[in-house]
Structures are given as C-alpha cells and as structure tokens.
Image (cartoon, rainbow, N blue to C red):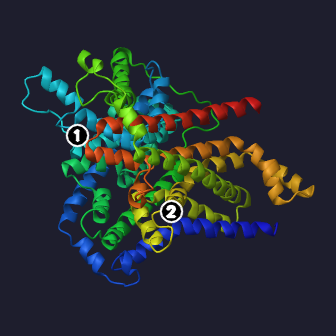
C-alpha cells in the first residue's frame, strides 16, 4: 500500500471525527454542566429539570402525533402515487417526476409560510374567500394547529417517500399477484397477503425516514405550531435557549440527548431495512414484463386528483408568495387587488441593510462552504470507495453519522463548543457547522462517481511516476467532474436555505436568509417575507437548473 494512504485516511478520520463527534460530545458534557459560562461544573440537575417538567408530557404527545401522523400520511400518499405511476395507465406520467423533484426546490420554511398565508385564521386567503362567499361567522380552517402541521409536513416528506417506494413498485413481479388471484384470493386479500409484504422493506424504509425527517423538522412547527401554542420537541428546545432572561442551554442539552439518541436509532433501523431488500427480490434472470392495470372510468378522476396535488405542492405555494409580495396587505385576489400591486415590498427588502446583509452572508456561506465541503467530500469519497480498509469503513460511518443529527440539537451542541472559543458569533462558526451537518450530501454523489472510475487508470498514473496528488488532480478529478459539480450544487442549495442550525448559532451580524425570513414571519411582515422568499427560491432553483445543465453538458462531451 502507498505509505501516504494511511496518513490521508487517518487525517480525514481526525477532521471528520471532529466535525461529527465534537458537537455530540459537547452536547453530552453540556447536559451535565450548570450553564454556558459554567462549563465543567458537573451536575445532574439539568436532567432532573428537563425530565420532570410537567409541560414535557404535552410536548411529547404533540411530537408523537405530529411525527407519526405526518409520516403515515406521506407514506400512504407516496404508496398511492407510486402505484398509479408504475402499475396503471394513468395519463401524463411525467407529472409524477415533477411531483417528486420540483417540491425539493421550495425550502421547507417557505412552504410552511405559504400555507400560513393561505389558511391562517385571521387573514388567510382561502379563509377570507370562503367567508366572503359563504354564510360563515369565522374562518373555517386554522392551519395553526396540530392537524395543519401534520398536513404540511406530510406533503413535504411525500417526495422522499415516493422516491424510495416507486423503484420497488416498478420492479415488482405482477405474476405473484396473478398467482394469488388464480388460487381464489380477492383484490384486498392479495394486497394484504402478497403485494404489501413483498414491498415491506421499501414501505418501512420510507416510513422510518419520514419519522426521522419529521422529528428533526423545525420550520413547520415554528411557523405553524408556535402561533397556535402547539409545541413539539424541536420548538420546545428552541424556546429553552431563546426565551426568558436566562436561556437554559444545559436543560436543552439534557433533553437534546434523548432526541439525538432516538434519531440515531431510527437511522440504524433505516439502514437495516434497506440492506435486507435483497431478501425480497422478485425479478431474476427470467423474462419480466410489468403488467399495466387499466383504470377505465377511474382514469380521468384519478388524474384530476394528481393534478390537484401538483397544484397544492408546487403551484399554490409559489403563487401565493409571489402574489403577496406585490399586494400591500393580505387580500383575496380581485380586480381591486391587482390594481393595487406595487414593487414596494421588493424595494423595501433590497434597500433594508439587514436583509442585504443576510443575502450576502447566505451567498458567502453557500459559495465558500460548498467549496470547502466538496473538497473534503472529494478525499473522503476517494478513501471510502478506493481503499476499502477498516479505517476507511470507520471514516464512512463517521461521514454519514451527521445525517441522523436533528439540526436544532446539533446546533445546541455546536453552541456549547463555539462559546468556549473565539469563533462564537462569527460566520466561521456557521461555516463549520454547515459543513458538518451536510457533509453526507457532498459525499454521496462523489462516491457514486468514484465507483465508475476503474482502479487501472490510477495505477497506470502511479506506475508512470506521478505522485498520488498529481494523479488525483490530472486523472481522477477530470473524470468525476459531474459528481463534483452535483455535490457542490447540492451543498450550496442546502446552505442557502439552511434554518435549523442557523437559528441557534446566528447572532447579530451573522444573520442568514432563513433567519431573516423567520424574523419577518414573527413580525407579521408577510409582504417583505414573500419578496425575500421568492429571491431564495430563485437562487435555489437556479442552482438546481445549473446542476442539470452541467450534467447534460458533460454527458454530451463524454
């Protein structure tokens, strides 16, 4: 083995280990400390205070209902859509691709805000419209409730669940169902005894991942839950460190340890479910042709239902933000409303020093952070894919550990660390936290790219006298440019819209777009919020389209 490889591997283990384990260790130590300014004064009082709080029971109940409700909703909806797309003759199937990809361009914060603009009880556009046309005493819908949170979070998690279930559904051998029917089983018995058991790994994997995402969710509970005084663990933790005269970081760390442990356990379960999928193979070397089910009269109604879902998930959220950014206050669309449209909110935002600072900070973190993240991901992916040693396996485990960390919890862990250093309240602190939290998003596309580069190319370069660094720069990197670009764009997009870590670590002078948008929401400045939100969507969508264009460009050149 090249003597430089073990040095590279252990250097990366030290760097990645610091980024992923440091906040966890600091969170653990902080949970036994009196406070940020009394770090090292160990006590169990924070655990006692956290777990004997009478309000914790209500928060736990809300969290369980929110997490399980939204996860069941997203999984069932994804299963229904996957069945329609892969097994039936429903028209315009490309719509399903739009449903699974486009919603990811809309940040969760803005998706939540758009539903608040539509269904809040005081001046939600849909509520105002219904009160105008129907004899109602008040608003019929209140999105500031547990059911509103479940609905919005479920819609947000549906695309991820669909991307997990649809491939399994597409490769399902329909002859198994036909055999069941031949032996006298009806449609429902076949569904329960044959179809769902075979698809069990994919369905459970989608469900568990939805639970992880809902447990870590902060945008939906913050925007829709806090105004209605519906707290879940994420917002409860935030309130501990942001309200009152003496924020209790020790108590937050003590409770955060339970949330972190639950998230890690769920990710381990998710990986176990996805790894056992080979036991449920239904396609072998024999001829396979998926059967298309004729919907007959149900074809058009089901397509209308899918179209309505597209309207709810894509068109309506962006449209309501765009509309609100031009009108002076919340009003039902009408000729009068359109005649009153101005660019005032846009000019106010672009001339407001705090908004401009937040935009500059977010762009800096996206460009510099994504560049550093991709550089680190490049070497980590190389070691994981090419070396395959025990040390490389350790590095892989450390690299993907942060995927299971809820942002609000890991932000508290980083706060315990940064407050002990000169990095506290700086953009560098946010930069390090971003890279640590989103490192898996950079490693994944580059690991896939490295798999496609044969080892003989690297060996030929080394035999010819090139150093490992020269080989990496002149041979390997040019071949994996599409993966590098995809990783950079993905990380930059995540950094632009990042909220959960930022809301803990951001301080005056280090505001970012998501934090500023949240501030507008707290103040009820919906017009400014919508204008700044559209700017965020334009930047995020531009980065995604740039990634697709770059990928196609390199494919044509290949």
Name the residue located 79 percent from the left edge and 67 percent from the top edge: 4
Name the residue located 21 percent from the left edge and 45 percent from the top edge: 145
**Which residue is identified by label 1?**
143
Q: Give left or right: position of 283 versus 526.
A: right
Q: Secondary structure at mark 2?
A: helix
Q: Residue 168, how many percent across, how many down?
A: 50, 39
Q: Is residue 121 depicted above or below 69 in this figure?
A: above
Q: Secondary structure at mark 1?
A: loop
How much space separates mark 2 and mark 1, taking CA atoms?
Answer: 35 Å
Q: Is residue 472 visible?
A: yes
Q: Is residue 443 depicted above or below 173 in this figure?
A: below
Q: Nearer the viewer, residue 474 or 462?
A: 474
Q: Residue 388, how many percent across, how many down?
A: 70, 61
**Which residue is identified by label 2?**
429
Q: In the rendered structure, which disc, 2 or 1, sits on the residue that comes first in sequence?
A: 1
Q: Nearer the viewer, residue 473 or 190?
A: 473
Q: Nearer the viewer, residue 317 or 457?
A: 317
Q: Give left or right: position of 47 versus 413.
A: left
Q: Give left or right: position of 143 versus 159.
A: left
**Residue 320 figure quarter:** top left
Q: Residue 432, how many percent across, how many down?
A: 54, 61
- Disc 1: CA contacts within 10 A as few (<14), some (14-19) or many (>=20): many
Name the residue located 81 percent from the left edge and 70 percent from the top edge: 3
Q: Quadrant of the C terminus?
A: top right
Name the residue located 29 percent from the left edge and 76 percent from the top edge: 47
Q: Nearer the viewer, residue 505 or 297?
A: 505
Q: Is residue 193 visible?
A: no
Q: Residue 116, how many percent across, how many down?
A: 27, 38
| Tally of marks | 2
């Amino acid at each position: 083995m090249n003597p430089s490889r073990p040095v590279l591997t252990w250097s990366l283990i030290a760097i990645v280990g610091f980024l992923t384990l440091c906040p966890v260790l600091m969170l653990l130590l902080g949970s036994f400390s009196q406070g940020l300014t009394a770090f090292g004064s160990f006590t169990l009082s924070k655990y006692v205070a956290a777990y004997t709080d009478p309000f914790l029971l209500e928060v736990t109940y809300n969290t369980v209902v929110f997490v399980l409700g939204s996860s069941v909703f997203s999984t069932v909806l994804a299963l229904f859509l996957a069945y329609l797309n892969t097994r039936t003759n429903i028209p315009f199937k490309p719509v399903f691709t739009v449903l699974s990809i486009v919603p990811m361009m809309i940040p969760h914060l803005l998706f939540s805000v758009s539903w608040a603009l539509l269904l809040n009880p005081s001046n939600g556009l849909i509520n105002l419209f219904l009160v105008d046309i129907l004899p109602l005493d008040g608003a019929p819908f209140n999105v500031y409730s547990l059911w509103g949170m479940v609905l919005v979070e479920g819609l947000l998690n549906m695309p991820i669940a669909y991307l997990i279930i649809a491939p399994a559904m597409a490769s399902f051998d329909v002859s198994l169902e036909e055999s069941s029917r031949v032996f006298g089983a009806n449609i429902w018995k076949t569904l329960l005894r044959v179809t769902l058991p075979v698809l069990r790994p994919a369905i459970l994997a989608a469900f568990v991942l939805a639970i992880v995402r809902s447990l870590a969710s902060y945008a939906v509970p913050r925007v829709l839950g806090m105004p209605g005084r519906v707290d879940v663990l994420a917002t409860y933790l935030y309130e501990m460190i942001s309200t009152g005269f003496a924020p209790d970081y020790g108590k937050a760390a003590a409770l955060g340890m339970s949330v972190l442990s639950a998230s890690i356990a769920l990710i381990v379960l998710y990986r176990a479910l996805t790894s056992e999928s080979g036991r449920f193979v239904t396609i072998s070397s024999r001829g396979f042709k998926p059967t298309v089910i004729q919907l007959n009269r149900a074809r058009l109604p089901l397509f209308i239902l899918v179209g309505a879902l597209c309207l709810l998930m894509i068109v309506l959220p962006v449209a309501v933000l765009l509309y609100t950014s031009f009108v002076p206050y919340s009003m039902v669309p009408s000729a009068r409303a359109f005649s009153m449209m101005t660019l005032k909110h846009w000019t106010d935002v672009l001339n407001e020093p705090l908004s401009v600072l937040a935009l500059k900070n977010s762009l800096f973190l996206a460009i510099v952070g994504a560049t550093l993240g991709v550089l680190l991901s490049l070497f980590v992916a190389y070691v994981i894919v090419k070396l395959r040693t025990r040390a490389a396996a350790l590095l892989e485990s450390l690299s993907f550990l942060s995927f299971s960390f809820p942002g609000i919890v890991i932000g508290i862990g980083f706060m315990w660390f940064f407050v002990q250093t000169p990095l506290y309240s700086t953009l560098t602190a946010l930069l390090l936290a971003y890279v640590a939290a989103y490192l898996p998003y950079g490693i994944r596309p580059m690991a896939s790219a490295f798999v496609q580069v044969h080892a003989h190319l690297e060996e030929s370069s080394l035999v010819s006298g090139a150093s490992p660094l020269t080989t990496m720069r002149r041979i390997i990197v040019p071949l994996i440019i599409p993966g590098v670009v995809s990783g950079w764009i993905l990380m930059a997009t995540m950094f632009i819209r990042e909220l959960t870590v930022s809301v803990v670590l951001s301080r005056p002078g280090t505001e970012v777009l998501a934090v500023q948008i949240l501030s507008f929401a707290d103040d009820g400045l919906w017009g400014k919020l919508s204008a700044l939100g559209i700017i965020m969507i334009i930047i995020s969508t531009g980065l995604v389209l740039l990634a697709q264009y770059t990928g196609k460009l390199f494919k044509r050149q290949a």
